[in-house]
Every structure is written in structure tokens, then in C-alpha cells.
Image (spheres, rainbow, N blue to C red):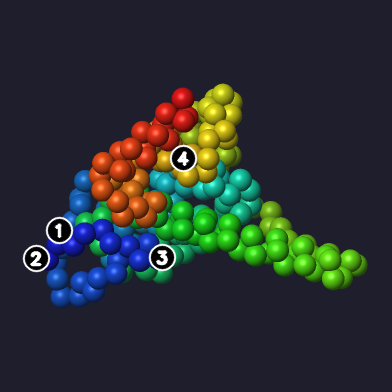
Amino acid sequence: VKTTENKFNSDGFTTENNVGYVTPTNITDIGNRYMSALQSGDRKALARLMELYNSRLYSFIYRIIRDTVTVEDIIQETWIRVYEHRFDYMLTYKFSTYLFTIARRKALSEIRRRNVRSIMRSLTQKDQSNDMLEDLDFEQNTFVSPDVFADGKLTAPIVEKALNKIPDHQREIVVLRDVEGFENDEIAEILGWKIPQGTIRKRVHDAREAFK
């Protein structure tokens, strides 16, 4: 038996080739149970995973993107990646950490694309005042409202107001820790931190202090 650490590449997938090895399964993780079923050919398992995690994904990604249509697109792209790479997934992972890692990286990629489009739009408007660039707009209402937490409770306006006052990087930490309930090491994995445990604890502490 060969065990491996949860090492993700830029897409959130394992960087190690585990062909020929048997790894222990994290059977206590309900996400892994459905991933195991998906790997065995049960396509309904993907729908079950979406039912379990879409509300949480929406709440998290919305606080990065702040655009409902784009959030829905990112969620769909995230699940496509999960399905396409289902055989690369190792059942030793915690599924929610794996899923949020993919979603966050896709959200950040979208922000980078927006920045590029904004620059190009500005240049085009200067050079061709009669040409207007329009963003594509798709009507989709497939996910929950951004003012709903995973447990169904409405977000208190005072909480949202406080979240909006802190920097983006600290808002991510607070949402992951106090809304989604991730542990410090899981937050570090999702945010791609390669730092000592003491530094992780300090970053989480500082973010929560800023939120108070």
C-alpha cells in the first residue's frame, strides 16, 4: 500500500501517478462515497454530489466574483472538471477540500480574464469610439440565492456588511473557516499556502480579528 499526500496541481488534481498502487479509502467522507460510485460508472452520483455541495459552492464563489451568472458558470465548469478527471481523484482526499480548490482557482482565473477584457475594452473605446464591446449574458437560475448559507439560513445583513469591509484575502479565510467550517490545514490547501502551521494559524486569526 502506498499512501500519498493531497498534492494538487494547477487544476486541483493529483500530480502523482498512482497506477498499480492501492490507497486507503476515506470512507467517512460522504463525498468520497459518491466519487467512488462515479468512478464505478454511476452517473447519478454526480447529481448527488451537486445536491450536496452546490449551495456551499455558490456562497463561497459569489463572495469572490460578485456576479450571479458568472458564479453559476464557474460551478458548472467545476463539476465538468470533476467528472472529466474522476479517475484521477484519489479517495484518500477530503472531497470538499478538493472541490473548493478547483472552484477557487477557476474563480481567480475568471477575475484575471475580466481584468484583461477590461483593459482591451478601454483600449478599443479609445481607438474606436463607435465600437462597443458587449459581454455575453446567459439567463440561468439553477442555483441558490447568494444570501443563503448552506444550512438554509439567511445571511444577516450585518455579517455581509462586515465581510465587505475586510480585504478579499481575509474574506476568503473567514468564509472558509466560519461559514463553511473548514479546518486551518484545509483552508491552507484550498488557498494554496505552503507555509508553516504557525503562520497558517496567524493568518486565520488575523482574518477573524479583522472581521470582528
Labels 1 & 3 near each other (Cβ < 8 A): no
The answer to whether any part of residue 142 appears in the image is no
Q: Quick one: SS at disc 1?
A: loop
The answer to whether any part of residue 168 appears in the image is yes
Q: Which numbered dot is residue 1?
A: 2
Q: Name which quarter of the figure residue 110 lies in.
A: bottom right
Q: Is residue 29 above or below residue 166?
A: below
Labels 2 & 1 near each other (Cβ < 8 A): yes
What amino acid type should be assigned to the residue bearing mark 4?
Gln
Q: Residue at x 42, y 29 (%)?
A: 209
Q: Is residue 41 left or right of residue 22?
A: right
Cα distance, mark 4 to mark 1? Answer: 34 Å
Depth check, front residue: 65 or 152: 65
Does label 4 or label 3 sit earlier along the sequence?
3
Q: Which residue is mark 3?
A: 11
Q: Quick one: SS at disc 2?
A: loop
Does label 3 or label 2 sit earlier along the sequence?
2
Given the current orientation, which residue lies at the most extreme left position?
A: 1
Percent x, y of residue 88: 30, 68
Q: Is residue 147 above or below residue 65?
A: above
Given the current orientation, which residue lies at the most extreme right position?
A: 130
Does label 4 or label 1 sit earlier along the sequence?
1
Does label 2 or label 1 sit earlier along the sequence?
2
What amino acid type should be assigned to the residue bearing mark 3?
Asp
Cα distance, mark 4 to mark 2? Answer: 39 Å
Q: Is residue 13 left or right of residue 56?
A: left
Q: Which numbered dot is residue 170?
A: 4
Does label 1 or label 3 sit earlier along the sequence?
3
Discs 3/2, front: 3
